[in-house]
Amino acid sequence: MRRTASRRLVVSLLALFAAPLVLRAADRPLANNVGAKIGDFRLQDADGKTTSLYDIKDKKAVVVVFLSFDCPVSASYAPVLADMAKTYADKGVAFLAVVVGDEGGAKRAGDYKLPFPVLDDPQRVAADALHARTTPEAFVLDRGFVLRYRGRIDDAYAGRLKRNREVTHFDLRTALDEVLAGKDVATPVTKAIGCPIPTSEAGAAAGPVTFHRDVEPILQRECQQCHRRGEIGPFALTTYRQAVNWADDIKEYTQSRKMPPWKPVEGVAFHNERKLSDKELSTLAAWVDGGRPEGDPEDAPPPPRFVDGWQLGEPDLVLTVPEEMTVGPAGRDLFRCFVLPTGLDEDKYVTAMEVRPGNSKVLHHTLNFIDGTGKGRQLERAERERAKAADEQDHGPGYTVSMGVGFAPQGTLGGWAPGQLAHKLPDGYGWRLPKGADVVVQVHYHRTGRVEKDRTSVGLYFAKKSGTRPFKGLIIPGGFLFIPANNDHYKVHGAIEVMQDCTLHDVMPHMHVLGREIKVTVAPPDGDPLTLIAIKDWDYNWQETYFLKEPMVLKKGTKLSVDAVYDNSDKNPTNPFSPPRWVFPGEQTTNEMCFIFIGATSDTPGRILFGPPGGKPYGRPKADEEAQPNSTHMKP
């Protein structure tokens, strides 16, 4: 999104695909061609070889599946379809993939090693013949090329990149088995979930709102940092044709303000807010409604220049994962921890940190910690011994945990997510990095449907002046003993009181997958309470650190409170348990948390004290700064 996107600790691939699918009338499954014979069509593969549907002879059934390798939902099914094709080959079933809407889609399919033909359909010949609407969408034809089933492959997804807890309906397999058994398909039509197949061609060359003059500048400013080849966006928006292909979704998701992704709906002003103005929103909508005119290419703004190297210049220390990490094509997301020795022979203060992924398509985000105990190395050695006897799709350096790094780190170096620029800490402050310490980087990898390789680097920038002081932190804990099962609106509250003057610079709310709402309130001792931040539609995949445009002075006696809401019911598609269970606090994703992390500075030596409102502090002053961790989080 914005080139200057704020630092995010946990991100997900993209809000467009994290949002629940909106069922428009045009998106509903068509049943009117089920039972009809499908006419022949001829398409070419990546090598220019022409294949006809009717060339597939003497088969008991044919599966035609529409794919897009720009769509993460579609790409995630590549290994599933490959396995199915191998399983059903001996049963007389042929598979055929059709790529529509992707530039060079059939050629890109080679990365996914599909064991069946993949054909390009640039003119929508096959898509129109089958009335295909979505990728992935599967069509089962019997030996006479009569359509017997159309719809989803299975129920792995409740919405775009909203996975269900488990797959319970294998619709394509069931339909194939019924056709092979000579039976009617019990459920011949299901709703395919994924990405829309482009249905509208470009309109007039000119109009009151045109692409090159009016729309392209907005896409460059707000979208192309992520939506370009090789970046985290699941499709590119750098050309007119690409924008036309995704025009309906551009309008729908910007009008609903799901894109650009920005979760706060109330609170103070933050740096790098990813919001479109009312004028920008109306411009995008008018272009889509007006037929998507291209306009004069001479009106196009110059292409943006994106920084490919280190954004803050060459770092003082670059730490690189020692070997490539191999990430398998399918399964749950992978959390991998890499131990990076610094080799420092003296303490340093880190004033900025930057991450350079080796493979931005697979790297979801990183969390970066400091370990001076050697515990990370112990876990890595144990993983190496265990992996000797294992044959796993994920392999390489480091070790795997579900959350955190498997131990209590000494401090943090912040986090990274795609689209952000490196962020400098306030002048005169830094994270303290002790001599000989390791940096342990927890990397969140998501699957792309193919085997991926990654080798990530972390750049550290050190303070050049003496007298640098530790960048400190507070935690506002939301207190709960458990979240009861079958409660869709369970409220949690917590509060602290600041016991020495300090200045607040950033805030990061944190919950897990049951979270629904979270709000932070600041109540000064001599003024009215104000909302620091409020998120009404919590998403575990869209967590980030928010940096205040104007740092806020917190006087002694200021009360900070958090109010959160959890949904531990079957209505929550991200609930890890079915039926719902009591959920307790803990580190695992299946546990829950409620914390607000705050970055702050203070002119007073030692920790920033805090405690329960009106109570005694949770800590006591210490003048020895060198004994303090970077992030002075003190849990009650």
Image (spheres, rainbow, N blue to C red):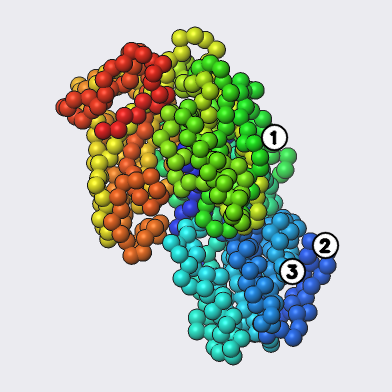
The picture places residue 412, in percent across and down from the top left corner, at 45, 30
Which residue type carries mark 3?
Answer: Pro
Q: Nearer the viewer, mark 1 or mark 2?
A: 2
Position of residue 112 in the picture relative to residue 377 (left or right): right
Q: Is residue 556 visible?
A: yes
Indicate the amino acid at tag 1: Pro
The residue sitting at 46% across, 40% down in the picture is: 405
Tell me the tag on residue 117: 3
Looking at the rendered structure, which numbered label has been put on residue 176? none
Q: Give the spatial CA distance, label 1 vs label 3.
A: 40 Å
The relative height of residue 331 versus residue 534 in the rendered view (above or below) is below
Residue 123 appears anywhere in the view: no
Judged from the image, the secondary structure of the residue bearing numbered disc 3 is loop
The residue wearing badge 2 is: 47
The answer to which of marks 1 and 2 sits earlier in the sequence is 2
Q: CA distance from mark 1 to mark 2?
A: 34 Å
In the picture, the quarter occupied by the N terminus is top right
Residue at the (58%, 88%) spot, across then down? 181
The percent coordinates of residue 144 (x first, y second) are 69, 87
The answer to whether marks 1 and 2 mark residues whose Cβ atoms lie closer than 8 Å is no
The disc placed on residue 302 is 1
Q: Amino acid at mark 2?
A: Asp
Q: Local crowd at mark 2 within 10 Å, few (<14), some, or many (≥20)?
A: few
Q: Which circle's residue, 1 or 3, is located before the other in the chain?
A: 3
User: Which residue appears at 26% of the width and 20% of the height?
Assistant: 620
